[in-house]
Amino acid sequence: MREVPDFPQPGVVFRDFTPVLADPDALRAVVDALQDKIDDSTQVIAAIESRGFLLGAALGYGWRYGVVPLRKPGKLPVVADSVSYALEYGEASLELPADAIQPGQRVVVVDDVLATGGTAEAACTLVERAGGIVTGVSVVLEIQALGGRTRLAGRDVQALMTV
């Protein structure tokens, strides 16, 4: 991953996943490694906008999971639920498409980076309020110093790399 200092604002170091996506061997290795950490009972990937979409789609296609995009506000034509949360540098919201997760479905939340945990926590909340069962949270990179794992206490959090 490439580190981009002072993005999206001064003092934040953005972890850019684009070089991994651009390298076919790296992308395959990351997707395969994520799959190895997903609970066997999982039925659906809840993919967080936007880089989580790419990982979720690859996992869904490769291992026959359904994929549900968790979107930023204003992107979905029919919204079932919305959750607002704090980021390390501001506020954000995620929305769940209507009828995308059925009660009792077993769902893993997928994203590229776990930082403060706000986004992943919001995603888990959306899944659970829809009646889904969160089987885990899988990310490529965890920034341990930001403590995101503590917001996900009691959940199976899997990170391929930790810095």
Image (cartoon, grey):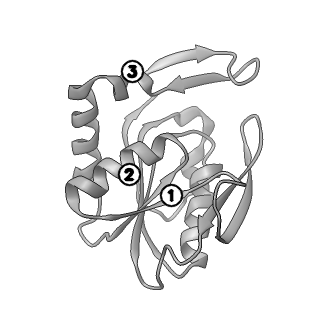
- Residue drawn at 54 percent across, 60 percent down: 153
Q: For residue 5, which quarter of the picture?
A: top right
- Residue drawn at 48 percent across, 85 percent down: 103
Q: 43 or 152, which lies in front?
A: 43
Element on which disc 2 rests: helix
Residue ID for mark 3: 19
Element on which disc 3 rests: helix
Provide residue 10's location: percent of width, then percent of height: 76, 17
Q: Any mark on residue 92, and which?
A: none
Badges 2 and 1: C-beta atoms under 8 Å apart? yes
In the image, taking residue 67 as reference, residue 94 lies left or right, namely right
Element on which disc 1 rests: strand
Residue ID for mark 2: 56
Provide residue 149's location: percent of width, then percent of height: 54, 49
Q: Quadrant of the N terminus?
A: top left
Amino acid type of the residue that numbered disc 2 sits on in the rendered structure: Gly
Using a 10 Å C-alpha cutoff, classify the residue at mark 3 as few (fewer than 14 neighbours), some (14 to 19) or many (20 or more): few
In the image, taking residue 150 as reference, residue 51 lies left or right, namely left
Sequence-first disc among 2 and 1: 2
